């Protein structure tokens, strides 16, 4: 354990690691009875990283079948490089990220070194009103299929840039599932094996049961508490992504005002911890949407509530029709990437300075060096056109066509002056 102490630079950190690793295994047994027989004892799970590395080196087989808990503890607070390696950036660009946003992901993984996903696999997730992409075509599917598609994309993303992520199913997934939790993004030669393992888990899970979110919130709070002091000292935060379609219930499936209040109380325990909360909704049910949107008034913590990227795009289109709210932009918000412009997109039209700031985020510092926000607006537009020529086209979820990230004609109309310009802004444009 000597090298582990050096990496974490934290007194008695081995004790924390052992306790949390044991907690992972105990929680598996408590919440997922069907996997109890295959769960190792907590003490057996706490083995040295030297032994793990040596065994993997000898066998050259991916560590899919054993619990990942003890393997991942040092990753929870492992220092991450804020600058992506060239091959990491290029892979993100291949996945559709604009260059500037791809490079921003390096900073994000550095400041947010661990992400916890709570995956709602309750019975209501089989409702057939979800939305997913099949190639470049949005299709109607079950909510679970939408979540499966979301997790598959984020698993590939996490593996690509070593963004450590822990995924936990809400309910017992049944005997067909190899595990009810999985990790991605610890680096190493087995990264792609981890992605395939994640896909296998999501594919074999059969959603059933209630929505006992509160217990899971307390569990994540305990995990983050174990490393909170170290994270605060280094200015780091965890991200919790709550992927759900329903109101919190008891384990017996009872939804009540008391259960909702207990859920809110559990979230309030997160307020004292270095954590950013994202609620990713997989439903349009008005009661559910209103419940989560109202959390802002009851919590004093960083919080974002998101719909699927198609519905988010429709809200943004009301004010900023020039923007193609493509999936990579939405993915960044799902993992907790913070930029004040995101909060404005669906609230009002951006002004010219904000459009420039948004373009710097999309295209990177090369755009900022090329043009200043104080430059003539026509010059800024010329530079936007030039940088758009270097980027891929993306599916526009509103028009359902492959389009650039920015529609220059609409952008020009939004800031057109005079009587004709006002008519264009009021009436919109079909171009």
Image (cartoon, rainbow, N blue to C red):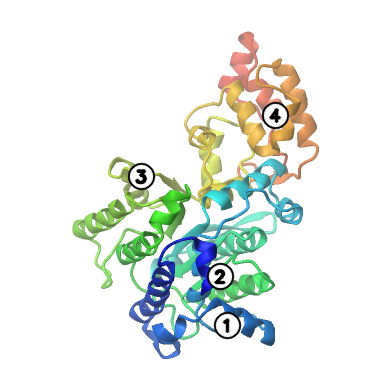
SS at circle 2? helix
The answer to whether residue 392 is visible is yes
In this rendering, is residue 85 above or below 379?
A: below
* Residue 7 x/y as whole percent: 54, 63
Which badge, 2 or 3, comes first in the chain's sequence?
A: 2
Q: Nearer the viewer, mark 4 or mark 2?
A: 2
The Cα–Cα distance between marks 1 and 4, rounded to whole angstroms, is: 48 Å
Which badge, 2 or 1, comes first in the chain's sequence?
A: 2
Q: Nearer the viewer, mark 2 or mark 1?
A: 2
Crowd tier of the residue under label 4, counting other residues whose Cα lies within 10 Å: few below 14, some 14–19, many 20 or above:
some
Q: Which residue is mark 3?
A: 301
SS at circle 1? helix
Crowd tier of the residue under label 1, counting other residues whose Cα lies within 10 Å: few below 14, some 14–19, many 20 or above:
few
Tags 2 and 1 touching, CB below 8 Å: no
- State the residue at coordinates (70%, 50%): 96
* Residue 298 x/y as whole percent: 27, 44
* Residue 44 x/y as whole percent: 44, 86
Crowd tier of the residue under label 3, counting other residues whose Cα lies within 10 Å: few below 14, some 14–19, many 20 or above:
some
The Cα–Cα distance between marks 4 and 2, rounded to whole angstroms, is: 42 Å
Q: Which residue is mark 2?
A: 3
Front position in the image: 5 or 230: 5
SS at circle 4? helix
């Amino acid at each position: 354990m000597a090298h582990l102490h050096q990496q974490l630079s934290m007194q008695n950190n081995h004790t924390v690691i052992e306790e949390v690793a044991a907690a992972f295994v105990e929680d598996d047994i408590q919440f997922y009875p069907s996997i109890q027989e295959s769960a190792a004892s907590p003490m057996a799970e706490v083995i040295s990283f030297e032994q793990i590395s040596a065994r993997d080196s000898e066998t050259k087989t991916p560590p899919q079948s054993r619990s990942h808990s003890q393997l991942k503890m040092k990753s929870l607070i492992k220092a991450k490089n804020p600058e992506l390696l060239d091959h990491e950036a290029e892979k993100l660009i291949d996945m559709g990220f604009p260059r500037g946003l791809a490079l921003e992901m390096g900073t994000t993984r550095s400041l947010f070194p661990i992400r916890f996903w709570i995956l709602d696999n309750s019975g209501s997730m089989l409702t057939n009103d979800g939305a997913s992409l099949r190639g470049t075509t949005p299709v109607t599917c079950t909510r679970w299929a939408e979540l499966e598609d979301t997790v598959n994309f984020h698993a590939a993303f996490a593996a690509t840039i070593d963004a450590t992520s822990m995924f936990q199913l809400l309910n017992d997934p049944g005997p067909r599932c190899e595990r009810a939790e999985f990790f991605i993004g610890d680096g190493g030669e087995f990264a792609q094996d981890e992605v395939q393992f994640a896909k296998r888990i999501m594919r074999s899970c059969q959603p059933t049961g209630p929505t006992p979110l509160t217990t899971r919130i307390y569990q994540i709070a305990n995990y983050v508490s174990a490393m909170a002091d170290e994270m605060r000292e280094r200015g780091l935060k965890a991200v919790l992504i709550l992927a759900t379609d329903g109101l919190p219930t008891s384990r017996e499936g009872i939804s009540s005002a008391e259960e909702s209040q207990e859920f809110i109380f559990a979230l309030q325990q997160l307020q004292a911890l270095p954590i950013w909360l994202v609620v990713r909704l997989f439903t349009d049910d008005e009661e559910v949407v209103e419940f989560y949107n109202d959390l802002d008034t009851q919590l004093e913590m960083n919080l974002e509530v998101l719909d699927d990227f198609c519905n988010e795009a429709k809200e943004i289109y009301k004010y900023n029709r020039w923007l193609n709210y493509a999936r990579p932009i939405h993915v960044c918000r799902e993992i907790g990437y913070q930029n004040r412009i995101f909060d404005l997109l669906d609230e009002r039209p951006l002004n010219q300075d904000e459009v420039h700031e948004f373009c710097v985020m999309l295209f990177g510092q090369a755009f900022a060096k090329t043009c200043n926000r104080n430059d003539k607006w026509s010059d800024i537009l010329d530079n936007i056109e030039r940088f758009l020529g270097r980027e891929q086209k993306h599916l526009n979820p509103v028009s359902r066509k492959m389009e650039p990230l920015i529609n220059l004609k609409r952008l020009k109309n939004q800031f057109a002056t005079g009587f004709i310009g006002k008519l264009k802004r009021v009436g919109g444009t079909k171009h």
